[in-house]
Image (spheres, rainbow, N blue to C red):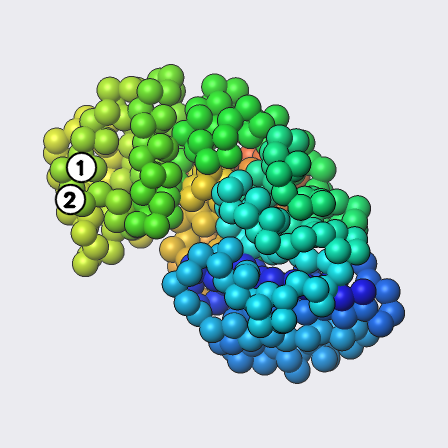
């Protein structure tokens, strides 16, 4: 069997998150190992040239995965979309006809229209076309399967489908062994809304008692997705008042042309009953003056110094479900592997990550998926004195605590 494996996340950063090393080995190896292959099966791995060079991927594959033939197809970076890049990869292979199965792997949210476009471009052959999203919005594929699969190719499935035969689903750079827990937890929420409706999903989680003490929306505020950001803001502004905190991280608030626009959003959030925790952005950012302006002009705004950010139990970020936390790095894995200075603190627990390893003052602790999903695991550290009254149940502590 010939399997075409496209590693996505091509437009995010020089080294896509799926390739972040775990114990020195790129996660791409874990993806390969999750496939059930027969002797003699071949995999066409389309991956970016600098990833191949950075990890010496060719030699690493020969050493770590010698039992199967892996054909590396290098891609150069370009500002095109994931789908366009996928098609470029297919063209470089001489079309999809050389593959019996196509596995599209991406670590970010992919719109339903993009999924369907990709499916239409890959006519089914052999086992059909397998499209797998292994990132923070994997449940969106379940939405497609139920509502729109007839518009796509012969088969649209997820990484946990038996045809991919994976006991592991990847989530933003970390692997999760309890696949069913992952999907059961969010399918019911996501099916009720369009997958891109971040605000509605968040409001629903809040209304169902989720312990979202800090809502982190870092990469939502990105010039490539202003409509997503605006949808999120407009939906959140009209969502029911909540006693929970809404934490607006302003490092990436490029969607705001000037601080005045952000101030207006903060005012609306406050009027809707949401407090806001602002983290100052990098000095040269367009929003670097926002916290100072906001705290003086808007009620319910609390400014947190970058070096004393409260650690939260559950973080909702990026495309509603993300693992960036406030580590100022692209992935949770970076934080887990951090070895220098103050970076080695606790990491945020995310509802998308299960049986997670939490690094807490050099102590490694495991927590169960059920406790995270029920909002029973909390951790706060270095909460500034003027912020503590807003967290009456969970004052700063140096240890991991469970309710």
The residue carrying mark 1 is 261
Is residue 206 toward the left or the right of residue 103 in the image?
Answer: left
Q: Position of residue 42 (x, y in %)?
A: 76, 70
Quadrant, the N terminus: bottom right
Query: How far apart in space, not on screen, are marks 1 and 2 (Cα)?
Result: 6 Å
Q: Quadrant of residue 156?
A: top right
In this view, the residue in front, 327 or 191, is 191
Q: Position of residue 361 (x, y in %)?
A: 50, 53
Which residue lies at the image location 12% right of the left edge and 34% below the top edge?
296
Mark 2 secondary-structure assignment: loop
In this view, the residue in front, 348 or 216, is 216
- Point out the residue furthest to the top here: 240
Is the Cβ of the residue at disc 1 closer than 8 Å to that at disc 2? yes
In this view, the residue in front, 10 or 354, is 10
Is residue 61 toward the left or the right of residue 303 in the image?
Answer: right
Mark 1 secondary-structure assignment: helix
The residue carrying mark 2 is 258
Which residue lies at the image location 45% right of the left edge and 41% below the top edge?
319
- Point out the residue furthest to the right here: 39
Is residue 61 toward the left or the right of residue 82 in the image?
Answer: right
Q: Residues within 10 Å of mark 1 (few under 14, many from 20)?
A: few
Tally the numbered discs: 2
Which residue lies at the image location 56% right of the left edge and 75% below the top edge?
74
Q: Residues within 10 Å of mark 2 (few under 14, many from 20)?
A: some
Instruction: Please tell me whether residue 300 is drawn above or below residue 254 in the rendered image.
Output: above
Q: Is residue 178 visible?
A: yes
Q: Is residue 174 visible?
A: no
């Amino acid at each position: 069997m010939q399997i075409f494996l496209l590693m996505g996340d091509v437009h995010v950063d020089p080294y896509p998150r799926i390739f972040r090393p775990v114990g020195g080995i790129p996660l791409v190896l874990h993806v390969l190992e999750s496939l059930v292959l027969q002797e003699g099966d071949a995999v066409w791995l389309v991956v970016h040239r600098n990833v191949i060079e950075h990890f010496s991927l060719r030699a690493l594959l020969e050493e770590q995965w010698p039992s199967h033939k892996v054909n590396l197809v290098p891609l150069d970076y370009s500002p095109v979309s994931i789908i366009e890049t996928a098609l470029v990869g297919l063209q470089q292979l001489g079309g999809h006809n050389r593959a019996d199965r196509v596995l599209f792997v991406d670590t970010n949210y992919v719109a339903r229209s993009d999924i369907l476009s990709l499916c239409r471009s890959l006519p089914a052959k052999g086992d059909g076309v397998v499209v797998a999203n292994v990132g923070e919005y994997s449940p969106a594929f379940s939405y497609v399967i139920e509502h729109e699969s007839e518009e796509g190719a012969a088969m649209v499935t997820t990484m946990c489908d038996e045809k991919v035969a994976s006991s592991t689903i990847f989530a933003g750079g970390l692997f999760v062994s309890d696949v069913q827990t992952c999907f059961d937890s969010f399918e019911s929420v996501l099916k009720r809304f369009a997958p891109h409706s971040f605000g509605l999903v968040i409001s629903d989680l809040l209304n169902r008692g989720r312990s979202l003490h800090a809502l982190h929306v870092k990469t939502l505020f990105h010039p490539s997705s202003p409509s997503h950001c605006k949808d999120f803001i407009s939906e959140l502004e009209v969502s029911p008042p909540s006693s929970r905190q809404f934490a607006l991280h302003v490092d990436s608030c490029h969607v705001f042309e000037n601080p005045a626009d952000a101030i207006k959003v903060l005012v609306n959030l406050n009027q809707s009953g949401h407090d806001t925790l602002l983290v100052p952005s990098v000095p040269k950012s367009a929003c670097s003056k926002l916290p100072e302006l906001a705290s003086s002009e808007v009620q319910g705004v609390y400014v947190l110094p970058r070096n004393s950010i409260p650690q939260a139990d559950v973080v909702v970020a990026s495309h509603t479900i993300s693992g960036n936390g406030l580590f100022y790095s692209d992935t949770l894995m970076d934080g887990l592997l951090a070895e220098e200075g103050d970076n080695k603190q606790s990491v945020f627990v995310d509802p998308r990550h299960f049986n997670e390893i939490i690094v807490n003052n050099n102590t490694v602790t495991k927590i169960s998926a059920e406790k995270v999903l029920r909002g029973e695991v909390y951790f706060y550290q270095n909460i500034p004195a003027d912020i503590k009254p807003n967290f009456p149940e969970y004052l700063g502590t140096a240890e991991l605590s469970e309710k």
